[in-house]
Amino acid sequence: MGKATLLLPLILVVLLSLPAPVSADTFEIKEGGSYLVLVDITKPLNMRLYEGTWEIRAYFYDGTNCFTVGDWWQPSGSTDWIYSGWYDHKIIGDDWGPESSTRTFQIPVTIVSHPRPAEDKSHGMQDFMYGQSATLRLRLLIQDVKPTFSGSTSEGSGSVSFTVGGVSYRYTYQVDQYGDINLSGQDLVNAKLDYDTSSGEYRLVIDHDDVGATFDEQAQSTDTFIISTPLYVNLTSFTSPEATYTVPPDLQIVLSVVSVLAAVGAGAYLGLRKKSEELPLE
């Protein structure tokens, strides 16, 4: 019996012991868990996303509590503290040309410990409880879209045009009570424009529909979560080709005759008016 035959049962045992990828409406997570989130992103074929100008983030949260690991830092000259768990778990996009519209991406995510670090609590982050629900959010960001707004960006509504990969788009926007510039129009959903204070540029943000999660002590400490529906980048260019219509030859002749008769009639009428006394304007 060869070595390969002897190793076969061992390989099968190892493979069967590995957690199978999970595709569900609600995922189970636990403290310190390391998970891989798989999601398809679908974009228009005419769109090009350049390397380093876009990214995909994933994080678990509930309200203002972020449950993915991160660090705290303070922007220069600010009294606010920022938690990097909201954006550390991501992949930076490569060059994605117009030859493909859908790709699958894998984002690694790590859950905080329980209890969570004292620094987290000092900044207002709370511990989770087993049995508690949470939300998995997937977020696509496209940098520096150079928007032009028709109105205010602090309140009200208007229209905005911006560019992605050299293609121009135009949508209506509404500033909500939190100052978010939400976009609407056609099939675009869960989209907004966000001002990045670190770069001084606006970026386009598109969120996937939120996915549920539950903290469970019996959950796998490592697992793969498959998101069942794609994140759609449903941008439609407002630069559409103009419709053209060729008048049939027979109709062209009729229209020419009508034009001549109209010109003759107008000339005769003006001649009669000129011979009579000027009429007052009504």
Image (cartoon, rainbow, N blue to C red):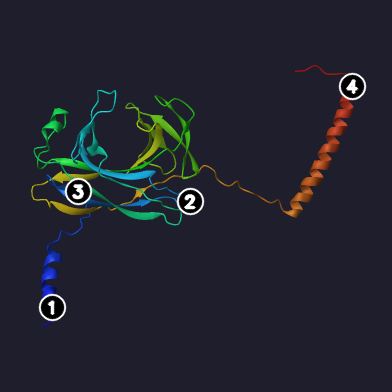
Q: Is residue 242 left or right of residue 262?
A: left
On the image, the x and y values in percent for residue 127 come to: 12, 36
Find the distance from the CA under tag 2 to the CA under tag 1: 53 Å
In front: label 3 or label 4 = 3
Query: Do the residues bearing badges 3 and 4 touch, measured as CB atoms within 8 Å?
Result: no
Tell me the amino acid under the disc marked 2: Asn
Find the distance from the CA under tag 4 to the CA under tag 2: 65 Å
Dot 1 or dot 4, earlier in sequence: 1
Find the distance from the CA under tag 3 to the CA under tag 2: 34 Å
Query: Do the residues bearing badges 3 and 1 touch, measured as CB atoms within 8 Å?
Result: no
Q: Is residue 50 above or below residue 182?
A: below
Q: Which residue is mark 2?
A: 46
Q: Nearer the viewer, residue 273 or 165?
A: 165
Query: Residue farthest to the front?
Result: 76
Secondary element at tag 4 = loop
Q: Residue at x 83, y 18 (%)?
A: 279
Find the distance from the CA under tag 1 to the CA under tag 4: 118 Å
Q: Nearer the viewer, residue 165 or 62?
A: 165
Dot 2 or dot 1, earlier in sequence: 1
In front: label 3 or label 2 = 2
Tell me the amino acid under the disc marked 4: Ser
Q: Which residue is mark 3?
A: 26
Query: Do the residues bearing badges 2 and 1 touch, measured as CB atoms within 8 Å?
Result: no
Find the distance from the CA under tag 3 to the CA under tag 1: 43 Å
On the image, the x and y values in percent for residue 116 come to: 11, 37
Tell me the amino acid under the disc marked 1: Lys
Tell me the amino acid under the disc marked 3: Thr
Neighbour class for label 4 at 10 Å: few (<14), some, many (≥20)? few
Q: Which residue is mark 1?
A: 3
Neighbour class for label 1 at 10 Å: few (<14), some, many (≥20)? few
